[in-house]
Image: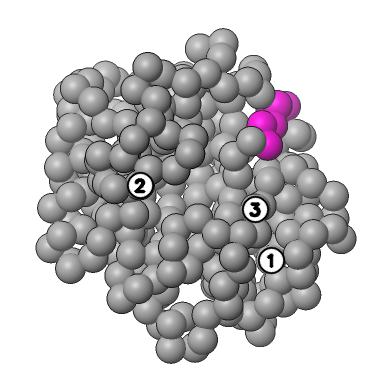
Amino acid sequence: MIEILSPGRLAAARTSGALVADILHTIRDRTTVGTNLLDIDRWAKEMILRAGAQSCYVDYAPSFGRGPFGHYICTAVNDAVLHGRPRDQVLAAGDLLTLDLAVSQDGVAADAAVSFLVGGTGDPRSAALISATERALAAGVAAAGPDARVGDLSHAIGTVLTEAGYPINTEFGGHGIGSTMHQDPHVPNTGRPGRGYRLRPGLLLALEPWVMADTATLAIDADGWTLRSATGCRTAHSEHTIAITEDGAEILTLPSR
């Protein structure tokens, strides 16, 4: 399903997007060496419920997972990259942590992710991974607008990632979003310009470039959810929800502070 939001529902999307961004910003600031992933999940739950919003994850049970996700935020560490299920793990200095969060408020969902180095410093190669996904995300947003096609966004994202020297996996990528978290169209992290669905004002997209340092192959944990690099290399993931407008694209998941 491809959903086009009315102006009134776009206002609700802005509310959801701001909430996602502010929760991620707050958790990033609170996360230090010694933080437990289960504490991060608890913080996310408290902030979502306090805002009167609904988690898109806790009851989420798609075909590629093993039962309901059962947590409020994805926490992926080092070689984990997607769907990282929080567990009893204490973070160390230099760990590369990705937080991925989706919530729904007033009937509209928003989704965002951020990667960072715990303690603020670490391997320069990890910083380069993070930077590549952030630059690819910016390129995807810049390519978005009315009458652009999905392939234009995919090509812009993929060009940055390829030029940075990273393999690209196309099993998981960006997606439409609206009254539900995952919708059509699928937005791969590489593609051909001028191809695919033509974007329209009112469409929401979650763009999410992610990479693994030296492989495009994923492995899955015994928890049935957490996806890791098959070689054990480090990974990074950046994501924003955007709204297509008459003038271009509006990022809905920027923090308010």
Q: Which residue is mark 1?
A: 144
Q: Which of the two labelled residues, at mark 3 and mark 1, occupies the earlier sequence position? A: 1
* Quadrant in which the N terminus appears: bottom right
Amino acid on which the number 3 mark rests in the picture: His
Identified at 69% across, 66% down, the residue is 144
Element assignment for label 2: loop
Q: Is residue 92 above or below residue 118?
A: above
Element assignment for label 3: strand
Identified at 78% across, 55% down, the residue is 151
Residue 51 horizontal side relative to residue 232, left or right: left
Whether residues under marks 3 and 2 lie with C-beta atoms below 8 angstroms apart, the answer is: no
User: Is 164 included in the stretch rendered in magenta?
Assistant: no
Residue 110 horizontal side relative to residue 72, left or right: right
Q: Mark 1, residues whose alpha carbon is within 10 Å: few (<14), some, or many (≥20)? A: many
Read off the magenta span: 165-170
Rendered image quadrant of residue 13: bottom left
Q: Please give the label number shown on residue 187.
A: none
Whether residues under marks 3 and 1 lie with C-beta atoms below 8 angstroms apart, the answer is: no
Rendered location of residue 137, percent (x, y): 60, 51
Q: Please give the label number shown on residue 186.
A: 3
Q: Which of the two labelled residues, at mark 3 and mark 2, occupies the earlier sequence position? A: 2
Residue 178 horizontal side relative to residue 143, left or right: left
Q: Which of the two labelled residues, at mark 2 and mark 1, occupies the earlier sequence position? A: 2
Q: Please give the label number shown on residue 60.
A: 2
* Quadrant in which the C terminus appears: bottom left
Identified at 34% across, 22% down, the residue is 223
Inter-mark Cα distance, 2 to 1 = 28 Å
Inter-mark Cα distance, 3 to 1 = 14 Å
**Residue lying furthest top:** 231
Rendered location of residue 194, percent (x, y): 87, 60
Amino acid on which the number 2 mark rests in the picture: Tyr
Residue 53: tell me if it is visible: yes
